[in-house]
Image: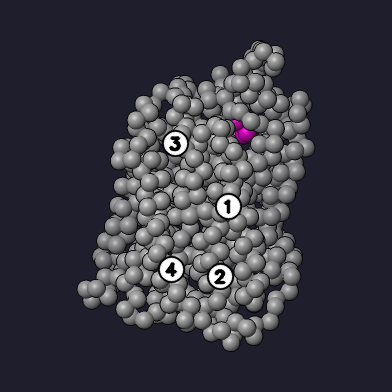
Amino acid sequence: MSTTEPAGTIPADTNRVGAIETRGIEPVPPTERTGRPGQLFWVWFAANISILGLPLGATLVALRGMNIWQALLVAAIGSFGSFALVGLISVAGKWGGAPSMTLSRAVFGPRGNHGPTVVSWLSRVGWETVNTTTAAYALLALLNIAFGLTANPVLTVICLLAFVALTLVVSGLGHATLVWIQQWATYVLGALNVVVAAFLITRVNWQAVLDAPAAPLSVVIAGIGVIAAGTGIGWANAGADMARYQHRNVSGGRIVAAASAGAGIPLFLLIGLGGLLSAGDGHLASASDPVSAIQVMLPSWMAVPYLLAAFGGLLLSNNLSVYSAGLTMITLGIRTRRVMAVGLDIVLTLAGGIYFMLIAGNFYGPFITFISLLAVPITAWVAVFLADMLRRREYDPRGLMDTTRTSAYWYRGGVRWAALLPWLAGTVFGLLFTTASTSADDVWFSGPLADSWLGTNGLGWVAAFVVAGALYLLLAVPGGRRGGEAGRTRPTPPEGNAPAGDRTVAEARR
């Protein structure tokens, strides 16, 4: 049965505030691409004003021994730099008008793309579970302060349901509503966060901050890796999802800058504040419930605005993650409407939140474990995708939606081995240096080279990036047919006389 879907058949008025976006992963026609980089700035700013940045900064100081100046340097490079990668992938969304993992079909082939897409979907669901769990903790604390309600299993489930329901409203409506909500809600929540941060600064042990010795350079390098893996790398596979509505004439540099600055500014401030708070006190870095750990630092009358800011920031982050996960699920081949895919994703997130809060005894440990493990295959995909962008400027919309033998991106049996093999090799190589554990006694996975310098500093994902990108550049040589990627021999017009879509087909076969 054919899985070819026509591109550009969705009415334009479905992408407006308050209306349900009916477009799934179909490429957006050029006439409907009216977005500007300023929209992306607010989307990424909103997605990163959650309190999860505070424990990341606390980890740098309390657990890795950096002084505050090193922590600020690490926060700047790790957050701004990693989201610059998100911005680069967003440029591909402007070129092709489709979500990241749909564009990835052109790189890996429709069948070869299944592996990276599954990893991407798992990453999104994991982040959503983290957001949902943390937000439920905030709501439970808020109900306790306002009404004296004590946390119990029933109330916990109600709080989880409330959060996922609010997420469903925004993510279900789709792109235009999401962009509008992210911008205007940021003004309110940003003001609340500024007020809360002002009070948190009064709790800083400035003597401990000034007396802290500097950590070795190796610790700083490793810290950059921790921040990058915990921030931009986790969002990289969603870069094009929002940028697909960007106008074709928008500068790629402005898109990169919007993503880097939009996410980097709030992350730098939150990570820096987390580092300040942890100078001389490592409680925040090791807290199983970061919401409560921060709440005890505030005067009681500040608890309500703090918890509202925490809940709202996590909601803004979750809106974008769930929207992206729905598109990724459709890319996997689940033939359903986008809004239904979002609903299914919400159900899975709810189940994950219940597990974290009512079954698992530790929240932050599984969070770090999850990031460290999935960062490796995601980074390998980023390397291959970015390397492919060096020689591609167009995507064939019909080829992206056709997952049969007639696709322009069918290659050999639906797989482009020149891309899939480097991704697999980069993933395996990176895992050799990776340890995934919640504690010294609870090790989920440990690679044979985990005790090396790269391994002990958590840089297995960097090794994956270098190996995957380098192998792809070697195998996918222009004009060559190495790696078993030669596809069908459908005649293609000479490049000088071919339209853009056909030129893309010619490029894709190289």
Q: Is residue 498 left or right of residue 118?
A: right
* Main secondary structure along the magenta-highlighted residues: helix
Between the residue at mark 2 and the residue at mark 3, the CA separation in whole angstroms equals: 38 Å
Quadrant in which the N terminus is drawn: top left
SS state under label 2: helix
Q: Earlier in the sequence, mark 2 or mark 3?
A: 2
- Give the class, few, some or many, for how many residues have Cα within 10 Å of label 4's Cα (few <14, many ≥20): few
Residue topped by disc 3: 330
SS state under label 3: helix
Between the residue at mark 2 and the residue at mark 4, the CA separation in whole angstroms equals: 14 Å
Q: Earlier in the sequence, mark 2 or mark 4?
A: 4
Q: Earlier in the sequence, mark 1 or mark 2?
A: 1
Q: Is residue 333 in view? A: no
Scheme of image coloration: one colour
Residue topped by disc 4: 194
Q: Amino acid at mark 3?
A: Ile
Q: Amino acid at mark 2?
A: Gly
**What x and y, as percent, mark residue 29?**
47, 26
Q: Is residue 496 left or right of residue 344?
A: right
Residue topped by disc 1: 260
**What x and y, as percent, mark residue 434?**
65, 60
Magenta stretch bounds: 105-109
Q: Amino acid at mark 4?
A: Val
Quadrant in which the C terminus is drawn: top right
**What x and y, as percent, mark residue 405?**
56, 21
Please give the label number shown on residue 272: 2
Between the residue at mark 1 and the residue at mark 4, the CA separation in whole angstroms equals: 21 Å
